[in-house]
Image (cartoon, helix red, strand yellow):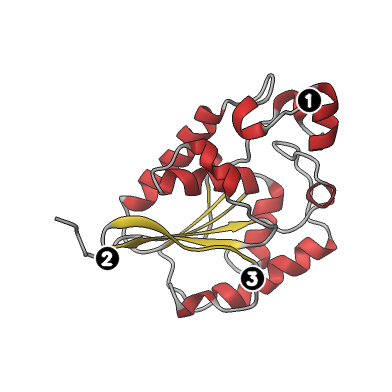
Amino acid sequence: MLDDRPRPRLVVVRHGSTEWSASGRHTGRTDVPLDPEGEAQARALAQRLAGHPFTRVLVSPLGRARRTCELAGFGHRAEVTGDLAEWDYGEYEGLTTPEIRARRPGWRLWHDGVPAGERIGEVAARAERVIASVRSGRGDALAFAHGHLLRVLAARWLDMPPAAGGQLLLAPAALGVLSWEHGVPVLGRWDDDGADPLVEDV
């Protein structure tokens, strides 16, 4: 029998644009700041997220996510959470996919991984700890983090393999709503970088 009681949802936000994200460079643990467009994107999030009574706000320790959180109006409430840090790309840090494929033809992050970095299972384990923490709480949570980490997190929210995150594009400053339908985890919204306020359907 399915449980129809309200359950905590998780609204996820990818940080705004950076010089490296705009050029397609893999940005894991390098603390690249928001570029001017990213700062404007982060400020625009304030209106979209205003009005929803989030019980928790979580943020990656990396500066680009923390700055996005701050400009969106949630910096004073945020809990820094190491599990929300971006994938550690090891030797591929700072490289674009074409540059990596010049060394390793046909390379795909989601299936081939990275040398001297994190395995996808390790990224998934961090995402699962975030999910467990949110689901054990009361009320909806908000998290500011990074593209690949959030794609893994969404896949695991849906009880899908971590590599399914490879099919869930998430643009800079876009948001997603990880929700429920009749007790089953669902995507309520994803890769939404438009202007509609969040409060209408959360």
Expressed as whole percent of the image width and height from the top left, the position of residue 84 reads 55, 44
Q: Which of marks 2 and 3 is nearer the N terminus?
A: 2
**CA distance separating discs 1 and 2:** 47 Å
Q: Residue at x 60, y 26 (%)?
A: 118
Expressed as whole percent of the image width and height from the top left, the position of residue 76 reads 57, 62
Q: What SS does tag 2 mark?
A: loop
Query: Seen from this angle, which residue lies furthest top?
Result: 116
Q: Residue at x 35, y 64 (%)?
A: 139
**CA distance separating discs 2 and 3:** 26 Å
Q: Earlier in the sequence, mark 1 or mark 3?
A: 3
Where 188 falls versus 122 (above or below)? below
Q: Residue 117 sits in which quadrant?
A: top right
Q: Which of marks 1 and 2 is in front?
A: 1
Expressed as whole percent of the image width and height from the top left, the position of residue 196 reads 59, 79
Where 117 falls versus 21 (above or below)? above
Mark 3 neighbour density, 10 Å: few (under 14) some (14–19) many (20 or more): many
* Count of residue discs: 3
Give the residue number, with chain letter if any, for mark 1.
105
Q: What residue type is labelled 2?
A: Pro
Q: Earlier in the sequence, mark 1 or mark 2?
A: 2
Q: Which of 177 and 31 is in front in this view?
A: 177
Query: Seen from this angle, which residue lies furthest front?
Result: 106
Q: What SS does tag 3 mark?
A: helix
Give the residue number, with chain letter if any, for mark 3.
45
- Left or right, 3 with reference to 119: left
Expressed as whole percent of the image width and height from the top left, the position of residue 198 reads 52, 74
Give the residue number, with chain letter if any, for mark 2.
6
Q: Residue at x 14, y 55 (%)?
A: 1
Q: In which quarter of the image is the C terminus?
A: bottom left
- Left or right, 28 with reference to 97: left
